[in-house]
Image (cartoon, helix red, strand yellow):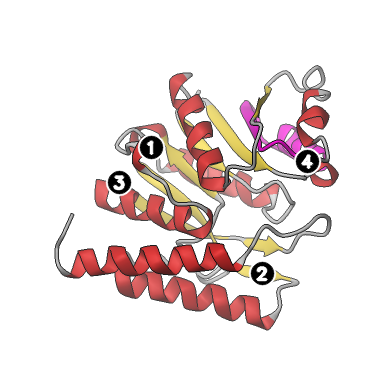
Amino acid sequence: MKRRLVVIPTYNEASNIVSLLEQIFTAVYGCEVLIVDDGSPDSTAAVCRALQDRFPHLHVIERHHKSGIGSAYRAGFAWGLERGFNEIIEMDADGSHQVTDLVRMIDFKSENPNIGLVIGSRWVRGGATENWSINRIMLSRFANRYVRFMLGMGVHDATSGFRIYSADALRTVDLNRIRSEGYSFQIEMTRLMHRSGFGIVELPITFKERENGVSKMSKAIVREAMFLVTAWGVKRILRIS
């Protein structure tokens, strides 16, 4: 049986994380979960550690500073690869990603083991968002169309943070060379998976806006993504690796 690790970065998610962990360990047979916490002032890490007796396949990495989601995923990927997991899953802590969708994604990946990356997509047929403003929908759609135009990958939701990677695909990536954060981390990983030759498949999901806590979205994250996508696109046009 394949070993699966769900990597969940957290910062001030104490109000959301218990419910999510209960759902994952109830619905997803045989998986393990790694929390990568960036020194949450609301004691998210302590809340998770208190659950480890109840959930023996729950692991926690506590970092002392808020270092960003890209850095958290790099740490989680490295942790999982070192321990021999076959598949590594990205998932948000705030309840925006549904465990029912995760089960479907895992089932699809099991039936298609040679696919390197499965993306839970809001912007393919059947995908949806709930409780998003029209401005946020337009921003996400525009950003993803710009990514498709500049990078030529054909992926409709390159900014999605709901994913399943095969370990073989991740091993083609030098994680230490990735410095992008936020949306741009997801885009860069999609770009690297596309260039590696591993297949990418998007499955429709319903993304629900968080009910508790505060979104981590910022103008700086958007600016970083636009700058990097433009730079990568220019390199592609000029055929610079």
Mark 2: which amino acid? Thr
Q: Outermost residue, front direction?
A: 65
Mark 1: which amino acid? Leu
Residue beneath disc 1: 175
Residue 17 numbered mark, or none: 4
Q: Residue at x 49, y 68 (%)?
A: 223
Of marks 3 and 1, which one's residue comes earlier in the chain? 1
Residue 151 position in % (x across, y down): 30, 66
Q: Outermost residue, left direction?
A: 239
Q: CA distance from mark 2 to mark 4?
A: 21 Å
Q: CA distance from mark 2 to mark 3?
A: 28 Å
Q: Nearer the viewer, mark 4 or mark 3?
A: 4
Q: Residue at x 83, y 23 (%)?
A: 50
Q: CA distance from mark 1 to mark 4?
A: 26 Å
Of marks 2 and 3, which one's residue comes earlier in the chain? 2
**Label 4: few (<14), some (14–19) or many (≥20) C-alpha neighbours in 10 Å:** many
